[in-house]
Amino acid sequence: MLVAGMFLKANEVRIVTLKGTRATHELVAPKTNKFTLIKNPTQGEVVTFGEQVKAFCIEHSIDKLVLNRRASKGQGAGGAGTFLMEGVILALSPSNIELVHPATVRATDKRTSEFKALKPKTVDLGKAYDLAFELLT
């Protein structure tokens, strides 16, 4: 099963794709690891963004997508960019989608950090990796 972690931040989606199990998994490293949607996009730009995500899922036979659950209020609450990208991905993705809360990721990291040797060093890609790792069995 291929699981793609999509970390939504500002106007970018960082993507890490994994296959295998938590104990024995590998990075599936396509050249694409980021999609961007500019601030204040036109309808055409939103359509293009949605088509890119959909094409990525189909081309790489992604079984499941995992998105970070956005904060709904308070400091760090998801802005308009992440709200828009989340909606487009939810509407157009051909893959099953799950939203994961950051607290769940932190709890899993405490229990299984020894299995995360492949985690990218870049912070945002690392968060996308953690999201994908959540759905590995």
Image (cartoon, helix red, strand yellow):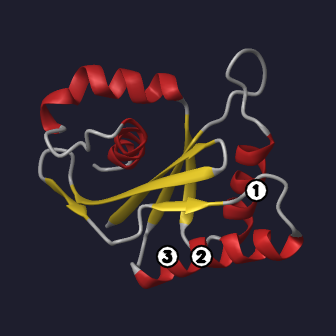
Q: What numbered label is drawn on residue 56?
A: 3
Task: Name which of mark 2 and mark 1 comes first in the sequence.
Answer: 2
Quarter where residue 106 is shown: top left
Vertical order, 1 against 104 (above or below) = below
Amino acid at circle 1: Gly
* Vertical position of residue 19 compared to residue 132: above or below: below
Instruction: Kindly report which numbered mark, 2 or 1, lies closer to the viewer in this rendering.
Output: 2
Q: Quadrant of residue 41?
A: bottom right
Please state the horizontal and vertical placement of residue 69, each as a whole percent of the image.
61, 37
Q: Nearer the viewer, residue 22 or 68?
A: 68
Give the residue at x 51% y 27%. Answer: 102
Quarter of the view holding residue 91: bottom right
Q: Earlier in the sequence, mark 1 or mark 3?
A: 3
- Above or below: residue 21 compared with residue 126: below
Amino acid type shown at disc 3: Phe
- Of residues 30 and 18, the one drawn nearer to the viewer in this rendering: 30
Q: Quick one: which residue is furthest to the top in this view?
A: 74
- Check disc 2 and report the residue beneath it: 52
Helix, strand or loop under label 1: helix
Identity of the residue drawn at 42% across and 46% down: 128
Three-letter residue code for mark 2: Gln
Q: Residues within 10 Å of mark 1 (few under 14, many from 20)?
A: few
Give the spatial CA distance, label 2 vs label 1: 14 Å
Q: Residue at x 71, y 55 (%)?
A: 85
Location of mark 1 (residue): 87
x, y percent for residue 92: 70, 72
Marks 2 and 3: in contact by CB < 8 Å? yes
Task: Tell me where residue 16 appears, x and y as whole percent.
Answer: 37, 56
Neighbour tally class for label 3: few under 14, some 14-19, many 20 plus, Cα within 10 Å: some
Any mark on residue 30, and which? none
* Label 2: how many Cα within 10 Å (few below 14, some 14–19, many 20+): some
